[in-house]
Image (cartoon, rainbow, N blue to C red):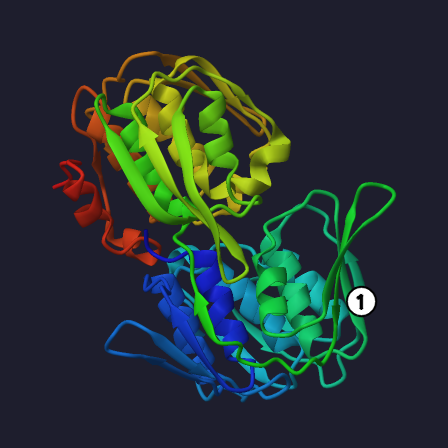
Amino acid sequence: MPGDKSISHRALMLAGMAIGRSRLLGLLEGEDVLCTAAAMRALGASVERRPDGEWWVEGVGVGGLAEPENFIDLGNSGTSARLLMGLLAGHPVTAFLSGDGSLRRRPMARAAEPLTRMGARIVSREGCRLPLAVIGAREPAAITYALPVPSAQVKSAVLLAGLNTPGRTTVIEREPTRDHSELMLRHFGADVRVISNDDDSIAVTIEGQPELRANGDLVIPGDPSSAAFPAVAALLLPGSDVTILNVGINPFRIGLFETLAEMGAGIEILGHRLAGAEPVADLRIRAAALKGVEVPASRAPSMIDEYPILAVAAAFATGRTVMRGLSELRVKESDRLTAIAEGLAACGVEVAIEGDDLIVEGKGEPPEGGALVNARLDHRIAMSFLVLGMAARRPVAIDDAETINTSFPGFTALMNGLGGGIA
């Protein structure tokens, strides 16, 4: 699998804030991550791709960001935008962030609100959308911030702003979200503490103004969100037996595989080990008959990017699958909730949206397919419906595959190497 996108973003940013040279191995070279690499260069870090595929990063140290000479183009990457807003907010610089048409439609207010409390100024278009300017605080103030909704990106933005902020910056989570930022910050030497409170909330605290240091080679695990596509394809196509190597199995990222197991999937976890601070394993997936299940809203943070491909699996299952609490899908690269429902309906699947819940009625057999699906410039919608087309009765087409390169360069070649038949 290509390197984990979430971890790749954080590795570039924090290596760029550390003293010394970091060697990043297995970095995702999708367009989203390349935008983060370019952004860190613009902010003064040395970021170099070596001919052997290694990435070498010479950091500037906490407090050492330079003011960029030009606006920073973040392409389609919402992760880059929100995390960079946090990094910039704690430094006395002004930076202008923009992106492609899809990213310019995505709201940034959730990240901007706590950063403003810390002393930064965010000047944006209506609805706190890009392009926007981040005017970093000259004297940033530590805060304790309770996340109104679960969001690893907002949590990370606040923690990154806390890097160059005196004192302790704390984020309170009612529901745990992926902890890649905490693990990566510790890897580079930051003091990050996680405490469970009496009310079952979680307090994540960073001690400001640490000296981050390069800490040997940093290996990026394979992306479980990318592994989802060959995994589901293997489940749906009779006779398939696929082993996916070096997949990150962070407990906050494996909600999809837990759900597929509940649906009857045969998934073996082999060779459990660590890559840096992250757990990884090889996953063996064999074709299986799936049954419908109810997916609780509490699982959404651990699989928010995998609902499109889960909905495809549900379309082949026997019985009803109910996916609850999917409001966050409305503000992803596209309105994914609507995109999933419209695409499935076009392929002959009985599907409904009730509030923030998605309901898929599976018949235990391949759906008709045969549709041209509007991918809405969303890489995960595009890949999910190509997988559906591999196992449907009739081929499925998507209107635009270009955005797939944002997260999974080589997707078509890999899937076709397994027999996928994408043309």
- The answer to whether 259 appears left or right of 128 in the picture is left
Spot occupied by residue 30 in the image (x, y as percentages of width and height): 32, 61
Residue shown at 64%/70% (left/top)? 160
Which residue appears at 36% of the width and 69% of the height?
A: 34
The quarter of the picture where the C terminus appears is top left
| 163 lies above or below 127 | below
Q: In the rendered image, which quarter is residue 137 located in?
A: bottom right
Image location of residue 304, percent across then percent down: 51, 41
Label 1 belongs to which residue? 143
Q: Is residue 409 left or right of residue 296?
A: left
Identify the amino acid type marked 1: Ile
At 68% from the left edge and 75% from the top edge, which residue is drawn?
A: 163
Looking at the picture, how far across and down is residue 198, in whole percent?
87, 43
Query: Which residue is the extreme one toward the right?
Result: 198
Residue 169: percent from left, percent from top? 77, 67
Please tell me which residue lies in front, 302 or 388: 302
Tag 1 secondary structure: loop
Q: Where on the picture, by quarter, is residue 171?
A: bottom right
